[in-house]
Image: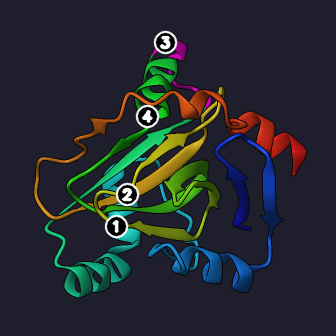
Amino acid sequence: MTYLTVYAEDASLLQRTEDPAKIADTLSEIGVRLRHWDVVTTGASAEEVLAAYAEQISKVNAEENYTFVDVVQLGPDADPAVAAGARAKFLNEHTHDDDEVRFFARGAGIFYLHLGGRIHAVLCEAGDLLSVPAKTTHWFDMGTNPEFCAIRFFHDDDGWVGDFTGDSISSRIPDFDTIVAGR
């Protein structure tokens, strides 16, 4: 189940909830959409994941004019150096010229959305489709032992391109492992 924690910029806790309606309302106030799809058991390959969700992917592409979709995944069998490098890449606050839209087919990760003096930490789990508008300041944490498979949607085939802010706020807010352990 999705979990939302909201912090002030000084890392003080403002809100914590697993209530789907409260999460949707809170995220909608900042222009972020959270939807849910039924989880389908899939094979491990990107092709199998994309095939299993082809109908839902087609609907999202038609609604939002996305033209490029891929799969990113890490699990317990990943090379520790690769996993650590991937985690480090996304941990620094950044923006994108494109929307950040992710569907979690397996596992979990936290999107930290920094807007209006608050940080909304959205723990996404299997079945969650999160749509973050372009130019939203954010970062992503997959934890020290990543386990996730996500479908990513883009408006062009450039894929993931981050514009880093240089702000160190991500180092002051509880990370994935801390939030999950305190849940």
Which residue matches tag 1? Answer: 133
User: Circles 1 and 2: CB distance less than 8 Å?
Assistant: yes
Q: Amino acid at mark 4?
A: Phe
The secondary element bearing badge 2 is classed as loop
Q: Quadrant of the N terminus?
A: bottom right
Q: Amino acid at mark 1?
A: Pro
Badge number at residue 106: none
Q: Is residue 98 above or below residue 166?
A: below
Badge number at residue 81: 3
Which residue matches tag 4? Answer: 90
Q: Is residue 82 above or below residue 35?
A: above
Question: For this view, does 27 lie left or right of residue 132?
Answer: right
Magenta segment: does it hold 146? no
Identified at 57% across, 74% down, the residue is 27
The magenta span reads 76-81
User: Circles 1 and 4: CB distance less than 8 Å?
Assistant: no
Q: Amino acid at mark 2?
A: Thr
Q: Viewer-nearest of labels 3 and 1?
A: 1
- Whole-percent x and y of residue 46? 34, 51
Q: Viewer-nearest of labels 2 and 3?
A: 2
Question: 115 or 107: which is nearer to us?
Answer: 115
Q: Earlier in the sequence, mark 3 or mark 1?
A: 3
Task: Give the distance between the C-alpha atoms of the residues marked 4 and 2, in whole angstroms.
Answer: 14 Å
Residue 36 visible from this viewpoint:
no
Badge number at residue 136: 2
